[in-house]
Every structure is written in C-alpha cells, then in structure tokens.
Amino acid sequence: MRKSQKRGYVCIRSLFGLLNGLFWILGGGVVGIAIWLRISYSGFVSLLPQHELLSLDSVGLIIGAVLFVVAFCGFIGAWFMSPCLLISYFILISILCGAELVCGILGVLYREIFSVSLQQELITGIQAHYNTSKEYTGITFAWDHIQYQLSCCGVHHYEDWFNISAWPGNFHVPHSCCIPSFQYMSGICIIKMKVRRSSMWFPSGCYNKAQIWLKERIHLVGIIGFVVGVVQIFGLISSMILFSFTRRRAGFKTYTAVKSQSFAK
C-alpha cells in the first residue's frame, strides 16, 4: 500500500470511528433520558395519548436505541476492523436511508390526509384525556406548555375546549389559554356562551401557530436534514472502504500462508 493510500485510509478510519463513537455516546444518553422519563414521568409529554408510541419517552427510546446499535456497529467495526460489523453498519444505514426516503415521499403525497388526521387526533386527546386533577398527566402538561409558549388556545380555536370530559356541560378553557394580564386568575377562565370577551384568552388555534413557527424555522430543518444526509452518505462510503480493505488484507494473508506451505514441501 502506498503512503498516500495508507494516510487516506488512516484518516477515514479515524474520522469514521470518532464520529460513530460520539453518536454511540449520544444514543446511550438519549436511551437513558427516555428511560428516566418513562419511570419518573409516565407519558411525560404526549399530545396524542391514544398513541403511546408517539409520546416523548417512547420516541426518544426508539431513536436512542437505533442510534446506539448503528453507532456501536460502526465504532467497534472500525476499531477492530471487523468485516461483519462493518457490513452490518452499511446495511443498517441503507435501511434507515430507505425508510427516510419512503417517509418523505409519503409525507409529500399524503400531507393533506395526514394533516386532517393529526388535527382530529389532537382534538380527541383534548376531549378525552385532558384533566385538571392532582394527577397532572402528560397531555395536560404538554397542552399548557404549548399554549403558554405559542400564545394560542385549542387546536383550531378556543371552542375546542368546550364541553370536554374534564368539565362536561361547561364552556370553559384552561388557565393556559388566558392572556398574560388574566393569568393571575386561579383555576380556569370561565367563558359563558353569551359573553365572549376575546380580550381574555388567546384567539388563535395552536395548529396554525405551530405551522407558522415551523415555517419561520424551515431553514434550520433544511440544515439539519442536509447534515444528517451528509453524515449518512459518509458512513456508507467509509464503511465500504474499510470493509474492502479488511477483506483485501485478509485475502493477502491467506495467500501468503498457502504459498509458504507449498515451498516448505
């Protein structure tokens, strides 16, 4: 092997191992946080309690576990130059890239259907699972936090809170719907159907506010997607280069051993 090739190989191996080592630690940290949330705060943040896999702790556990396993194969494979782990890494990254591509295409083709379904699920979560009891559930925390931060009320508008299971037969909204000048009031803001003072609560729905918030930060989403894509492509190319080198080196050693035995005879 030429010196330039050897230097390039060492550089690729070092960068590949370092990158996967960092992601391995990151994946383990995400798994640890997700387990802590699951044990300490069951359903900590979940806007869709009817779908437990979409809660923050479940999503974090899945992402962390996938990241941990993939980075483990890459880091240990590069450290010990294991062809098995390197090819496993390549296959896992390929599957992830394929899944991301499929999800992106489906998201573009069926975005309207997904949007309508998501809005309905959010409303169902409000109507059936929001409560103001001492057992402060994940959906209660999530909605109150979002409404405070985005200055919004309900999914589409404040009427989404009327006659829900937490206050059946009453036309109330949560305290988090009140504008700052009325948030000193304890409990909830009581809104009678005949007296609707729009100055008391946030008039806009949270779904539109969230869309606006994402559109204002779409460049960050693009940057993150670009970085993830570059890292994955680098991982695919690097794992194949290292795999090819290990196979070639193993073949060379086998050939040398056979040749030496033949001369001995």
Image: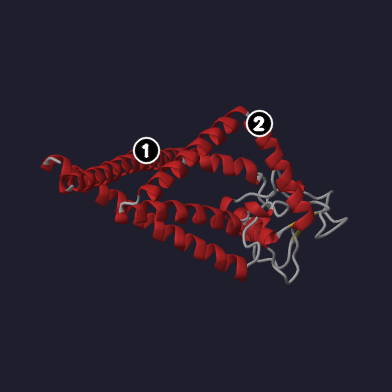
Indicate the position of residue 190 as horizontal and vertical percent values: 78, 58
Q: Is residue 135 visible?
A: yes
Identify the mark at residue 199; answer none if there is no mark: none
Indicate the position of residue 102 as horizontal and vertical percent values: 55, 33
Task: Kindly identify the residue that appears in the image at 82 percent across and 57 percent down.
Answer: 165
Indicate the position of residue 221 as horizontal and vertical percent values: 45, 41
Left or right relative to 196: residue 259: left
Q: 169 or 4, which is in the foreground?
A: 4
Task: Kindly identify the residue that appears in the image at 35 percent across and 52 percent down.
Answer: 77
Left or right relative to 10: residue 94: right
Relative height, residue 212 to residue 64 (above, below): above
Residue type, mark 2 in image: Glu
Q: Residues within 10 Å of mark 2 (few under 14, many from 20)?
A: few
Residue type, mark 1 in image: Ile
Tell me the residue that label 1 is attached to. 233
Q: 203 or 138, which is in the foreground?
A: 138
Task: Kindly identify the residue that appears in the image at 34 percent across and 40 percent down.
Answer: 240
User: Which one is closest to the eye, mark 1 or mark 2?
Assistant: 1
Left or right relative to 101: residue 178: right
Residue 93 found in image quarter: top left
**Farthest-out residue, front:** 265
Indicate the position of residue 211 as horizontal and vertical percent values: 57, 40
Task: Determine whether the residue tagged by mark 1 lies in a helix, strand or loop.
Answer: helix
Tell me the residue that label 2 is attached to. 112
Task: Determine whether the residue tagged by mark 2 lies in a helix, strand or loop.
Answer: helix
Mark closest to the chain's N terminus, 1 or 2: 2
